[in-house]
Structure formats: structure tokens, C-alpha cells
Amino acid sequence: MEQNDRADMMELNDRANLMELNDRAEMMELNDRADMVELNHRADMMELNDRADMMELNDRVDMMELNDGTDMMDLNDRADSMELNDRADMIELNDRADMMELNDGADMMELNDRADMMELNDGADMMGLNDGADMMELNDRADTMELNDGTDMMEVNDRADMMDLLVYSSSSHFMRSSLKLQKKTSHTLEQTLGSK
């Protein structure tokens, strides 16, 4: 009986050990499951974190894209402003060119006016020269007339001298007649010269 009791005790011990081993195995399995659940949680958390990081990156990309779009709009605005400034400068240059053209036209008109004035002055000088030439011609004609008058006077004097010779060679009566004729001739000559 004692041996049976020992055998029963050993069997009980074996069962107890087996139960303990089973309990330990179940505990280890539970621990493994708990570890697996924790790992799954960690994996889910990491996935969530990765998704959050991806969303943040996407937000940053969107923000950068918006900034790039804003910069492009700013560049376009600047380009438009520069184009407007270029157009304003071109208009100003055209206005200056028109003003210079007007000034050149005014200068040309002034030069034409001066040329006309010089031409008028030249015409006036020519008229003055013509008047001077006419005056000289009149003076020449007067001198010619005076020379003609002098020639006529010399001719008259020659005739008078001829008449004096005739008077000296004639008789006293003829001499008186000749003197009267000479006076009459002189008087007629004076009237003739006076009429000229």
C-alpha cells in the first residue's frame, strides 16, 4: 500500500507538474499574445505616425506649391509692371521725339524766315543799288548835258569870234549892225539855254 501511495503521490506530483507546466505554457502564450497585441498596437501607432507624417509632408508640399504659385503671380505682376514701365518709357520717348521733331520744324521755319528776311534784305540792297545806279546814270546824263552845253557855248563863242573878225573887217556901219546882230544872237542863245 505504501508503494501504491507513493506511486499515487508521484502521479499526483506528475499531474501537478504537468498542470504547472500547462499553466506556465498558457501564461507564456498569454504573454506572447500580449506582446503580439502590443506589437500590433505599436505597428498601428507607427503606421498612424507615418500617415500623419505623410499628411504633414503633403501639407508642406501644398504650402510650397501655393508659395510657388504666389511667387509666380508676383513674378507675373512684376513682369507686367516692367512691361507697363517699358510702355510708359516708349511713350515718353515718342513724346520726346515728337517734341524734337516739332522743335526741328520750328527751327526750320525760323531758318526759312531768316532766309526770307535775308532775301528781302538782298532785294532791298539790290533796289538800293539800282537806285544808286539810276542816280549815277542821271548824274552821267547831267554831266553829258553839261558837256553838251559847254560845247554849245564854245561853238557860240567861236561864232562870236568869227563875227568879231567880220566886224573888224567891215565898215563901222556894218560893225554896228553886226554888234546888234551879236547881241540879238546872244539874247537868243541865252533864251535857248534857259529853255534847256
Image (cartoon, rainbow, N blue to C red):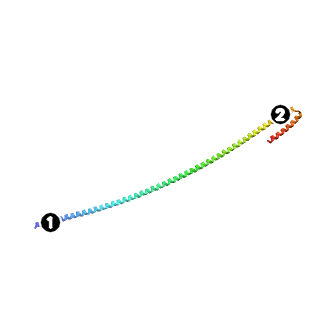
Query: Dividing the picture into quarters, in which one does residue 53 lie?
Result: bottom left
Under tag 1, what secondary structure?
A: helix
Percent position of residue 94, x then y: 54, 52
Q: Report the residue marked by disc 2.
A: 162
Residue type of the residue flagged with mark 2: Met
Q: Nearer the viewer, residue 81 or 118?
A: 118
- Identity of the residue furthest to the right in this view: 173
Residue 18, placed above or below residue 121: below
Q: Earlier in the sequence, mark 1 or mark 2?
A: 1
Horizontal side of residue 53 vs 130, given as left or right: left
**Location of residue 95 with respect to 195 vertically, above or below:** below
Residue occupying the point 57% across, 50% down: 101
Tell me residue 14's x, y (percent): 16, 64
Q: How many marks?
A: 2
Task: Report whether 63 appears left or right of 169.
Answer: left
Distance between mark 1 and mark 2 Cα atoms: 218 Å
Q: Nearer the viewer, mark 1 or mark 2?
A: 2
Q: Secondary structure at mark 2?
A: helix
Residue visible at 40% across and 57% down? 65
Image quadrant containing the C terminus: top right
Question: Which numbered dot is residue 11?
Answer: 1
Q: Residue at x 80, y 36 (%)?
A: 155
Of residue 21 and residue 145, the one placed in the foreground of this image is 145
